[in-house]
Image (cartoon, grey):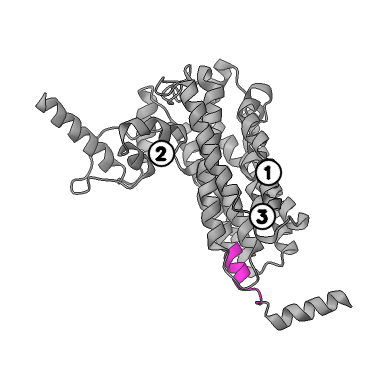
Amino acid sequence: MLGSRTTEFARCLRAVALAWLPGWRGRSLALARAAGAPHGGDLQPPASPGPRGRQFSLSAAAVVDSAPRPLQPYLRLMRLDKPIGTWLLYLPCTWSIGLAAEPGCFPDWYMLSLFGTGAILMRGAGCTINDMWDQDYDKKVARTANRPIAAGDISTFQSFVFLGGQLTLALGVLLCLNYYSIVLGASSLLLVIIYPLMKRITYWPQLALGLTFNWGALLGWSAIKGSCDPSVCLPLYFSGVVWTLIYDTIYAHQDKRDDVLIGLKSTALRFGENTKQWLSVFSVAMLGALSLVGVNSGQTAPYYTALGAVGAHLVHQIYTVDIHRPEDCWNKFISNRTLGLILFLGIVLGNLCKEKKTDKTKKSIENRIEN
């Protein structure tokens, strides 16, 4: 018994150490798929030899694995071990908060942290709802069969109670905002509930996801300003929606074979071999909308420089993606976090380059308005 425990402990150490090796995702994904294990977002690094001397990891998956065993199924249910989804939900919020900042000033750090907390909770709630709806489908697909509800680690009743807890905490975050934002935020709950069902109804479930995931582009601005400016918020929201169509279509190409077998729909199946042409159109629409955002919000050179970098990232992503290789689709999908951070940095630097409004300037503007 002692020998078996020692062997198991050694395997755990090797698995954690592997996370520090450059390029482990691509290799472990291929091994996982060959063994029939989950791919893409559900990937777990296989046990294999790693470098000595580094026996722990601060990766999200390693943190979840180190949590008390009774908590682990709940943490995996809200996908804390796969934070890319939280990033993609959070980034449109940061864009909006950054654009709403006063000229010459940094974004409101309190709001950034508040929305970060809300993104974790709402993404977790969305995943819980998704897994509750899809538990029968998940059992039939290798990639999703180990999800906590499908695997029987958590009952439907337990997941429902857990969902209530997440939504209660998210409501607490929402109540920290102004009344306009509270109503606006609460109105997104319907989208959160119904978007997991769209893949059973339409070949455009990614559009429903985009409408849901980018609600923060409206909410972030209203949290700072007290209401939405349609000239800025609407094109920003639109750009986020088409961005979601881009990255989630790429993601969906990982699952297209399983989706056909179990009767689910996606833009990956809708576009097929014409995917790159569709994604190119979406990219042009995204860049055009973001350019309009820059003009309407009085952005400066750093913003447009970042926009050029975003365009280059999109071109590279779409031109090089191999829609028939799930591991490449996964790598292109997660690279969108970098894209979102580039745009946020451009917004912050662009805003810092604006002329800061002094009290004298504000009074002058108010006098002009009155006259």
Q: Is residue 325 visible?
A: no
Q: Please name which of the two marks, 2 or 1, marks the residue nearer to the observer.
A: 2
For the residue pair 185 and 353, the one nearer the viewer reads as: 185
Picture coordinates of residue 223, whole percent (x, y): 65, 56
Amino acid carrying label 2: it is: Asp
Instruction: State which quadrant residue 274 falls in.
Output: top right
- The part of the chain drawn in magenta is 347-356
- Left or right for 236, reference 69: right
Q: Tell me what residue is drawn at x 56 percent, y 34 percent.
A: 126
Q: Is residue 112 above or below residue 169?
A: below
Q: Which mark is residue 81?
A: 2
- Identify the residue under disc 1: 282
Q: Are marks 3 and 2 in contact (CB under 8 Å)?
A: no
Amino acid at dot 3: Asn
Q: Quadrant of the C terminus?
A: bottom right
Residue 227 is labelled as: none
Between 126 and 241, which is closer to the camera in this rendering?
Answer: 126
Q: Earlier in the sequence, mark 3 or mark 2?
A: 2
For the residues marked 1 and 3, what is the alpha-carbon distance in whole angstroms? Answer: 34 Å
Tell me which corner region of the image, top left, top right, bottom left or bottom right, holds residue 149: top left
Q: Is residue 98 toward the left or the right of residue 63 in the image? A: right
Distance from label 2 to label 1 (Cα)? 30 Å
Find disc 3 in the rendering and name its residue.
178
* Mark 3 or mark 2, whichever is nearer to me: 3
Residue 367 seen in render: yes
Marks 1, 3: nearer the viewer:
3
